[in-house]
Image (cartoon, rainbow, N blue to C red):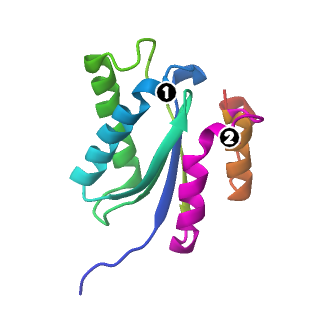
Amino acid sequence: MSTYTQILYQIVFSTKNREHTLVKESQKELYQYIWAILKNKKCHLYQIGGITVHIHILTHLHPSIALSTIIKDIKLSSNEYIKKQNLFADFNGWQEGYGAFTYSVKDKNNLVNYIKNQEEHHKNKTFKEKFIELLNEHGIEFEEKYLL
């Protein structure tokens, strides 16, 4: 029997120390690079986006890929790419952790729109405030002191 899965992951992580280093002019190139990583691992990217301080990735992972492995690959590889290409002059790396949330495929269109409209969502709320909302929405216990 074959393996069948349909799990949408919304992956969220920020720049190191929440520094505003992902300048808008170069974000598209970063997103294309991350898309290529996912495609190479047989994962399907539905949407990627963010603002100067963080990114959101909406993807379906191939059943052979562990979530922590793909995030590690994305962070390490994109960090190297950013530095080699001098894509973001002030970029100092990614935060240590990440957030990953699962959704039903029925939520896909709403999530795509949410990720496309990150600038609008962050006009009145910081990354930390929105991230806490996500954690609460998914019933994840956390200690605020670790949300620098």
Residue corresponding to mark 2: 120
Q: Quadrant of the C terminus?
A: top right
Q: In this picture, which residue range is highlighted in magenta?
A: 103-126
Q: Is residue 111 magenta?
A: yes
**Which residue extends farthest bottom?**
1
Q: At x 58% / y 68%, what residue is drawn?
A: 107
Query: What amino acid is found at the position of numbered circle 1 in the picture?
Result: Lys
Q: Quadrant of the N terminus?
A: bottom left
Residue 113, position as x, y percentages in the image: 58, 55
Q: At x 67% / y 32%, what residue is drawn?
A: 147
Q: Residues within 10 Å of mark 2 (few under 14, many from 20)?
A: few
Per the image, label 2 sits on a secondary structure element best described as helix
Q: Are marks 1 and 2 in contact (CB under 8 Å)?
A: no
**Which residue extends farthest top?**
90
In the depicted structure, whether residue 135 falls above or below residue 9: above
Query: What amino acid is found at the position of numbered circle 2 in the picture?
Result: Glu
Residue 51, position as x, y percentages in the image: 56, 33
For the residue pair 106 and 109, the one nearer the viewer reads as: 109
| Image disc number at residue 24 | 1
Q: Is residue 98 magenta?
A: no
- Mark 1 and mark 2: Cα distance apart in space: 14 Å
Look at the image and tell me whether residue 80 can be seen: yes
Residue 29, position as x, y percentages in the image: 34, 33
